[in-house]
Image (tube, rainbow, N blue to C red):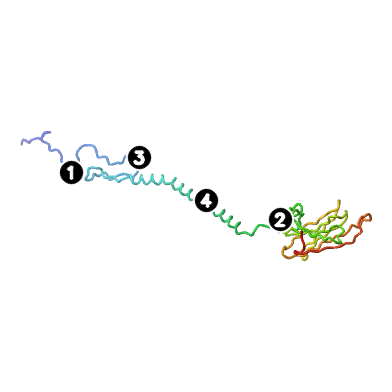
Amino acid sequence: MTGTNAGPDDATPPGPDDGQRPAGPEPRTAARAGDDADDRGSGERGEDGERDRAPAAPRTRWRRLRASGRPRTAALWLGGLAGTAAVAWVTAVSTGLADRLLADDPPPACPGEACDGRNPQTAGCGDDAFSYIPQEDNPVALQIRHNPACHAVWGRIAAGEPGDVVTAEVTDGALRTAQISVNRDIFTKMAGVDNDAFTVTVCATPTTREDRSGDWQPYCISATQDAPWY
C-alpha cells in the first residue's frame, strides 16, 4: 500500500481557532519600569484601539496640588496669625486708650489744688497773690496772703528781725510756721483753702534774744474770703 506524504506546501497552517498560539513575540503587558502598581492598566485594548489603562493624571495632579498647597496653607496660616496679632495689638492699644480716657482726672497741679505745703515763691503763686494788711497796731507789717488760683493762703512778716516767728493756721486746716534767719522778712509755706469759704489766722511772735530791737508783744490777725484783699 502506497501512502501519500504531505509536503511542506500541503501542511495546513495553524489557525486562530486550532488551540495553538501564533508564533511571534508575546504581547507586552508589563508596566514601564518605574510605574507604580496603581498606575498600570489592564493590558486590554478598548473600542478606540488604545490600551485600557487606569488614568494616572488625576492622582499625579492631586499630588502636585497637595504639594503646591502646603506653602499656600502655610502662608494663609501665617497671614491669619499676623492678622490675629494685629487685632490683639489694636485691641490692647484701644483698650489702654479707653482706660486712660475713662480713668480719674489727673492729680491737680500747682497753681491749682496741689499747692498745699509748697513754697509760694517757687510754685509761682506769689506774683498774683492778694494781701490783707491791717494798718494799725501792726509793728512788724504782718500780712495774710491769698492766691485764689492756687487755692492757698500763707502768712508773712515784712518788717521783723532774725528770730521772729510767723504762723498761718487755717480753721479746720493746716498750720504753717516760719522763722526769720537773716534780713527782716519771712513767709510761711502755703495752706490749702476752699476759696468760697475759709478763715485763716496769722500770728507774729518776737524773737527771745536779749539784743532784740523791737518792743512788741505777740499778736494775730484774721481774715476770711470776704476780707478787704488788695
Question: Which residue was labeled with disc 4?
Answer: 86
Mark 4, secondary structure of its residue: helix
Give the SS element for disc 2. loop
Residue 19: numbered disc: 1
The mark lying in front, picked from 1 and 2, is 2
Amino acid type shown at disc 1: Gly
Q: Residue furthest left?
A: 1
Which of the 4 image quarters holds residue 228?
Answer: bottom right
Where disc 1 sits, the SS reads loop
List the residue tagged with mark 2.
111
Badge number at residue 34:
3
- Earlier along the polypeptide chain: callout 1 or callout 2? 1
Left or right of residue 215, residue 133 in this image: left
Dot 3 surroundings within 10 Å: few (below 14), some, or many (20 or more)? few
Along the polypeptide, which appears first: circle 2 or circle 4? 4
Q: Residue type at mark 4: give it.
A: Ala
**Residue for point 89% across, 58% down:** 206
Please identify, in this view, whether the residue under mark 1 or under mark 3 is nearer the observer: 3
Q: In the rendered view, does 192 fall on the left or right side of 140? A: left
What x and y, as percent, mark residue 15? 15, 41
- The residue lying at 94 percent from left, 54 percent from top is 211
